[in-house]
Amino acid sequence: MRPDNSTKIKIRRIALALFKERGFDNVTINDICEESGISKHTFYYYFASKEGLLKTVMSLPDELSSDEAARIMMLDSPYEQYCEILKKRVRHFEACGKDIVKKILVARLTESFDEQKERADFNEEKPFLEMQISFIKKAQERGEIENMGEPKSLMHAAFCLLIGISQVWATHPGSKFNLEVEYFKILDTVMMKKVEI
């Protein structure tokens, strides 16, 4: 974790915990500031609003720890490396819970894709996104996936797929819909993962 992001990550973690505990509409910026031990000025330095904070939750909660990165890099398959990164994002959504994911999706609907790319949290994730593109390209070169589309476009498709399947999961009654299982089943189809015979 980079030092310049530690306060932002702390605020986001505390806000998410409060949203899960009390519900998004029942938490104020003052509540977040008090629990985080920060001033309102500090909150507004990082986030334009409570809704603005919520929009950043779609980004990964933290950078990969060095242990996680080492474990992923030890995997022999670039496609499996890519999927391990995506699993972190999917599990983050599951940890947020259905109610928070619904609020995130609604908040993100108010932005165009171009506006989302201009946000600071998108730019902070750029090195991480470039790593994902690299894994996709290597998976194509090794024949692990047969979809030979442009790697950056495939990464965007995988993210859009996550948004769509998360919406189904968040609005699905009960707990029988497994977000991770359903997401990777469809992702493998989109990527045209080569099936071993």
Image (tube, grey):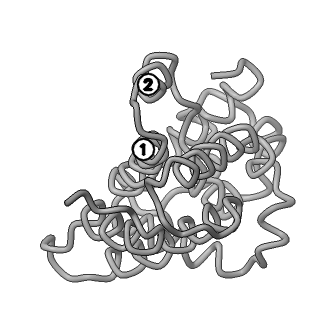
Q: Tag 1: Cα neighbours inside 10 Å, few (<14), some, or many (≥20)?
A: some
Q: Position of residue 13 (x, y in %)?
A: 51, 39
Kindly identify the residue that appears in the image at 62 percent across and 22 percent down.
1
Q: Secondary structure at mark 1?
A: helix
**Residue identified by numbered label 2:** 68
Residue flagged by tag 2: what amino acid is it?
A: Glu
Question: Which quadrant of the view contains residue 36?
Answer: top right
Kindly identify the residue that appears in the image at 42 percent across and 44 percent down.
88
Task: Say if mark 1 contacts mark 2, CB within 8 Å.
Answer: yes
Q: Position of residue 178 (x, y in %)?
A: 21, 66
**Residue identified by numbered label 1:** 88
Q: Nearer the viewer, residue 196 or 48?
A: 196
Kindly identify the residue that appears in the image at 46 percent across and 50 percent down.
86
Apparent side of residue 88 relative to residue 120 in the rendered image (left or right): left
**16 lies above or below 179:** above
Q: Looking at the rendered structure, which numbered label has been put on residue 24?
A: none
Q: Nearer the viewer, residue 88 or 185?
A: 185
Q: Quadrant of the C terminus?
A: bottom left
Q: Position of residue 133 (x, y in %)?
A: 66, 50
Residue flagged by tag 1: what amino acid is it?
A: Lys
Q: Residue at the far front: name it.
A: 197
**46 lies above or below 68:** below
Q: Secondary structure at mark 2?
A: helix
Q: Position of residue 98 (x, y in %)?
A: 34, 68
Question: Which quadrant of the view contains residue 151?
Answer: bottom right
Distance, label 1 to label 2, CA atoms, is: 10 Å
